[in-house]
Image (cartoon, rainbow, N blue to C red):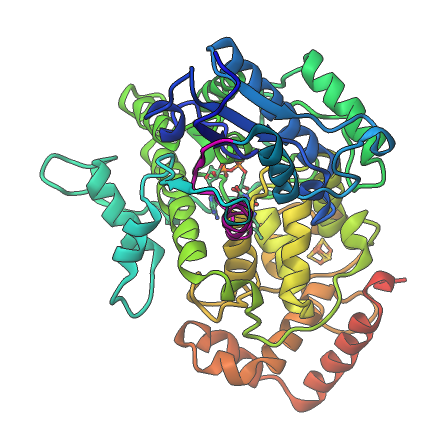
Amino acid sequence: MGDSIRNLVVVLGDQLDRDALVLRENFDREQDAVWMAEVAGEARHVPSHKARIALFLSAMRHFRDTLRDAGFRVYYRELADSAEYDDRGGADESLGAALEESLRRLRPDRIRMTAPGEWRLLREMQTRSAAAGLPLDVLPDTHFFDLVRDFKQYAEGRKSLVLEYYYRDLRKRTAYLMEPDGKPLGGRWNYDSENRESFGKNERPELARPIAFAPDEITRTVLAMVERRFGNHPGSLGEFDWPVDRPQALQALDDFIQKRLPDFGRYQDALVSGEPYLYHSRLSAALNLKLLNPREVCAAAIAAHARGAAPLNSVEGFVRQILGWREFVRGIYWTQMPEYAERNALDAHEALPEFYWDGETEMNCLRETIQQTMRFGYAHHIQRLMITGLFALLLGVEPARVHEWYLAVYVDAVEWVEMPNTLGMSQFADGGVMATKPYAASGKYIQRMSDYCASCRFKPAEATGPDACPYTTLYWDFLARNRGVLRKNPRMSLQVKNLERKLPAELKAIHLQAVKIKKNPGSIGV
Ligand code: FAD
Ligand code: SF4
């Protein structure tokens, strides 16, 4: 093995895919090498949760070792234990700067990589390779069912994009949950109506604890380093138990299929105090790092149904998330960027309340969700959409600030999936590209779907007065201030009509209470 390098294959932190084309095709272990780098700038460009940083770095180190064991030459830049001793790139080194420095030393003939998931990194890689005068080959990311160009083709000529039709198209193409005659298995495409159960006020789900992975030596080293270097970042590391390599990710998949998939559908939208995971899979981070392939994940769920171990409403609901939503949001991201990041269709400009970083608020639903987020780096979809996301929407927080928060605090956060979910689905900042209407609701929705309100000092049915639920006050205020836009949306007509039934005096009182909340959200109820 000589020192000279023909192709330097760049592998990013969320490209830990042993089956990637760049590692399989035209990779000559004699002439080619892999390059990976840990850089502080990636942890700091939004103030990442410590568990998110640790997960990425531990998974990268495990992947490096897997490649080396398989005979690949890997150049790997580890973050030093302390910024003081990091003599190369400094405390905020960017990935591009790290690559440039390595290119000067390694002098490869060309650079190859899988298409980055994030627009910013694609541009950065293009700029740095051009500056170094080196050709850059960007290979398609075959981890996904659709290549970006397939989605672009699908989107072309369509007036609007609707998840349901795209999902059905993918069901037909993959033959997942399909009868041989081309009809959906069970006769329906969609079992959403069976997937909206909640637990009663006093009912508790019976849950088996999800599989937990005790940190091995690599992870322990990373956890200690993250605590030392990123100690002032949000979140804690005390509960870190995420899968960090492929064998663990496969165990996590198996654990979900056996213990939680059967009830996944039924309780998909439920919220329960003290239960961060309920029947959710906890697989998003392993999928986004590419430790798992979405095909094997869907196949495992479909096989469970075929052997009678999981009902169709659960399996279809789960496949819809991965085959449908996950692919759809990626398509939206890559067809709408870079302008997408700037969208603010509802002209919202409030600051993100400080309590989003520590959960110190009297609102029980928000306190539960945020404190759980800081503890685990995880919240399930309905907590993200209908607790933290809903409050920011109703309050009118600037979408870019909401986006930065979501990108920072979840272990599974990567921009291509986080941004359309936040700006589009949750904040309606894209004016309806992702979702056909804003997910706006009052405290009564949260009361129906959770047990949070039972131990909260506010009353979800009240919109004004000292006991009024801030969600309910802000819900009516949201409808009133966006009435002009919402009136044009037929799916909002009932909500707008209900608003118009309110007497002017009531609307005025709501408005005054909303103004007080907005002035100082941290003091709600105090
Ligand atoms: P499950 O409920 O078990 O779902 C199974 C899988 O389906 C997930 O692992 C995920 O891969 C996929 N999935 C489910 N819902 C979505 C969706 N809306 N979009 C794309 N994929 C989906 N997901 C991320 O992976 N990263 C993010 O940064 C992220 N940010 C979000 C921000 C907001 C405001 C919202 C509303 C949603 C966000 N989601 C994000 C989507 C979803 O909430 C998470 O994928 C899910 O909660 C992860 O937990 P789980 O693996 O237990 O999911
Ligand atoms: Fe949340 Fe309002 Fe219910 Fe309290 S009453 S938990 S603030 S929805």
Q: What residue do we see at 45% from left, 33% from top?
A: 109
Instruction: Determine if residue 307 is in view.
Output: yes
Looking at the image, residue 342 lies above or below residue 286 = below
Q: Which residue is at a point 68% across and 15% down the rendered structure image?
A: 218
Residue 524: percent from left, percent from top: 83, 63
Indicate the quadrant where residue 258 lies.
top left
Residue extending farthest to the left is 181
Residue 307, percent from left and from top = 29, 19
Q: Residue furthest right?
A: 526
- From the viewer's perspective, tell me whether residue 332 is left or right of residue 518: left
**Residue 171: x %, y % from top left:** 25, 42
Instruction: Pick out the residue farthest to the bottom.
Output: 504
| 483 or 462, nearer to the observer | 483
* Quarter residue 479 falls in: bottom right
86 shown above or below 160: above
Up-down relation of residue 453 to residue 350 (above or below): above
Say whether residue 465 is left or right of residue 473: right
383 over 156 or under it: above or below: above
Please tell me how many numbered marks the rendered image carries: 0
Query: Is residue 125 on the magenta stretch?
Result: yes
Residue nearest the observer in this picture, 86 or 50: 86
Q: Is residue 205 magenta?
A: no
> Residue at position x 54%, y 20% from top?
74
Residue found at x 50% / y 68%: 430
Tell me the magenta residue range. 108-129
Q: Position of residue 485 (x, y in %)?
A: 51, 81
Residue 243 visible (yes or no): no
Image quadrant where residue 80 sits: top right
The C terminus - image quarter: bottom right
